[in-house]
Amino acid sequence: MKKVAIIGTNGIPSKYGGFETLVEYLVKYLSSEYELTVFCSSITNPNKIAEYNGCKLEYIPLRANGWQSIFYDIVSVFKSSRNYDKILILGASGSIIMPLVSRYRKKYIFNFGGLDWDRSKWNYFTRKFLKLSESLGIKYADYLISDNIGIQEYIQSEYNRDSTLITYGGDQAFGVTPEKKDFEKYPFLKDSYAFSVARIQPDNNIDLLLESFDEKSPIPFVLVGNWKSCKYGIETKLKYEGRPNVILLDAIYDSRELNLLRSNCKIYLHGHSAGGTNPALVEAMNLGLPIFAYNCIFNRYTTSNAAEYFSSSDELSIKVQTVSDPVLSDIGSKMYSIAKELYQWETIANKYSEVIDK
């Protein structure tokens, strides 16, 4: 069996995040085909279990996010370079080291996700570093994976390299029928509401979404996110909590509770503007939810131009106020059909297997 290392994530079992969920399902479907090892952060996984679903876990004593992620990924690349047949690198932060390990040919599979350097949360120097790291990863990796047609076109036009298009799955999402205890905890479940789950950062257009709802809105907006993780989140929550028709909830890690809230919403809002195929979006599509997405190329590709799109808070506000139930039902049906065709984890894992076997 080929020995395959997967690096660049917090590790598994997954809690929150697209790459972690991807790794979880790659392990589920591919651990019988390969000898898999997933590199994990011992800081965010203090229990340090040795094995999970037939996959070995190796721990690095650094955080997989923030500035430590650079060194976390560099250490992971060095530790895996000689001992594995293929190495799947997820994310661009540690790719700065790729020129030094490029002598180990036919090993490296690189999926940098989205345009992380283009996120407005980063300062000038961080953006420059991430862009450089991305370019080195693309230059020195043997195989490239893009998760969205927009990313695939970007790689081709920016770096003149081909990449294999492999999206994310979303079929782990499931519908939940509310029970008495749910109505007591979340009274808004009794009526119609708009919903979104997102990391609280500017490029997810959090302010735009929240400004679209006020006392004139026909339904409230429920937004779940990691409000306490950064200054922007703390300040934004203070600014908007208590406003009419806005309900702000802290991050939810329980799958039943999260699926309860999103599977019963009238409209699912997706404000992400940077990146490729966003996991939360394809999960919502698998639930057959009517989706209103920020008008950018990545979201249009993911939804096959069949969702509703907005570019400003005024535009979104008008759409929410005027959309009819038949239109919402039609959008939801289209999203479900697209998801069943394109965003299933077993299919995604098989495509990764094809790249590993090259």
Image (tube, rainbow, N blue to C red):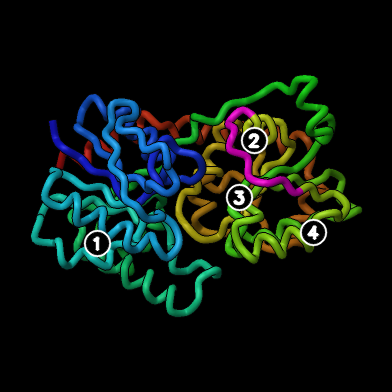
Mark 3 Cα-neighbour bin, 10 Å: few <14, some 14–19, many ≥20: many
Magenta-colored stretch includes residue 237: no
Q: Marks 3/4: CA distance?
A: 16 Å
Name the one closer to the observer, 121 or 114. Answer: 121
Q: Secondary structure at mark 4?
A: helix
Instruction: Name the amino acid type tagged 4.
Output: Tyr
The residue shown at (58%, 26%) is 174
Quick one: quadrant of the N terminus?
A: top left
Disc 3 and disc 1: Cα gap in Å?
31 Å
Q: Which residues are magenta?
A: 248-256
Q: Neighbour class for label 1 at 10 Å: few (<14), some, many (≥20)?
A: some
Residue ID for mark 4: 240
Frontmost of labels 3 and 1 is 3
Locate residue 48 relative to residue 315 in the image: left or right. Answer: left
Which amino acid type is marked by label 2?
Leu
- The picture quadrant where one finds residue 229 is bottom right
